[in-house]
Image (cartoon, helix red, strand yellow):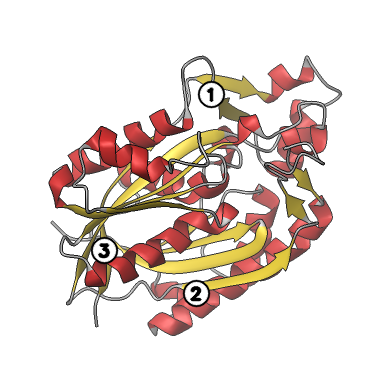
Amino acid sequence: MSGIKLLATGSALPQHVITNHDLEQIMDTSDQWISSRTGIRARHHCRGEESHTGLCLEAAKKALERGGIRPHQIGVCLVATLTPDHLTPATACVLQRELGLEEDTVCFDLNAACSGFVYALHTAECLLAAAERKYALVLGAEVLSRVIDMADRSTCVLFGDGAGAALVQWREDYPSIHAVLGCRGDDRVLVVPGVNKREPSVVHMEGQDVFRFAVEALPRCARQVAQKAGITLEEVDRFVFHQANQRIINFAVKKLGVDPAKCTGNIEHTANTSAASVPILLDELVEKGEVKPGDKVLCVGFGGGLTWAGALLEVARS
């Protein structure tokens, strides 16, 4: 058996906060309407000189400092994102320069939308097995404020910006994260056209279809990870679910039959940050002491693609 464990985390949120009351001033909506349907009361948006790369750099530096690992010890650097500052160079490549990682560090960006961070954890686990240096920086980061239409109240209220980072170590005596990954190709239900000039580069989402997909994929993925790991859901210390919509999470928690106290989130003040969602929440829980050394954390992401991904990430003991 070999695999990775979590050594440290970091996160970064833009300073500018947009509350539901702020949105009331510019569109036909209300705090009650948004919060009752989504659980969201505020979100962070980049302004001025704040950038996707800057958020990643801040989150990565925190993880390295907290983990006591020097840049020259990193063998892999991955960034899960669909909203980088550049299509190329990859954000991970810019981080290599800014953090002073060795030039032979494996660095690239990965796009699996809201499942991206968990996809990247599994990718890092596989790459580290063959790497000379056994530490990896795995990030999820988004600046979704760039791809929302502020005239579309059905989507613009949902999304926020931010970055989260995880510092992981591979060892032969560490357990696998038992990742479960999946995809159901769909470019209608949830799509950002990107460089396709025939359509605006803004989020388009069929809300009811996304809801039906999510409430089926999330609990199924969580069960499959636990089964693959040979444990029961009751043996999981903490669940970290993608913060897409509180109603989705509540429905999935009830379907799984697990303790809701193990599934609390942060969507109220971060909104949906896509690939950044899981690592930002993970960092908040670590900093609050709600995720501790030795804990087994079951992470699940789901979203555009349509993709889903789950993994059982154990926190390393000092």
Instruction: Please indicate, yes or no, whether residue 239 appears anywhere in the rendered image.
Output: no
Mark 2, secondary structure of its residue: strand
What kind of residue is marked 3?
Answer: Lys
Which mark identifies residue 268?
Answer: none
Mark 1, secondary structure of its residue: loop
Q: Which residue is mark 3?
A: 5
Q: Position of residue 192 (x, y in %)?
A: 71, 45
What kind of residue is marked 2?
Answer: Val
Choose mark 1 or mark 3, whichever is in front.
1
Identify the mark nearer the N-term, 2 or 1: 1
Give the distance between the C-alpha atoms of the residues marked 2 and 1, in whole angstroms. Answer: 33 Å
Which mark identifies residue 46?
Answer: 1
Contact? badges 1 and 3 (CB < 8 Å): no
Give the distance between the C-alpha atoms of the residues marked 3 and 2, in whole angstroms. Answer: 17 Å
Q: Which residue is mark 2?
A: 180
Identify the mark nearer the N-term, 3 or 2: 3
**Which is more toward the observer, 6 or 93?**
93
Contact? badges 2 and 1 (CB < 8 Å): no
- Decide if residue 102 is on the left or right side of residue 283: left
- Decide if residue 237 is on the left or right side of residue 2: right
Identify the mark nearer the N-term, 1 or 3: 3
The 10 Å Cα crowd at callout 1, few under 14, some 14 to 19, many 20 or more, is: many
For the N terminus, the image quarter is bottom left
**Which is more toward the observer, 275 or 221?**
275
Q: Position of residue 118 (x, y in %)?
A: 46, 60
What kind of residue is marked 1?
Answer: Cys
Displayed quadrant of residue 312: bottom left
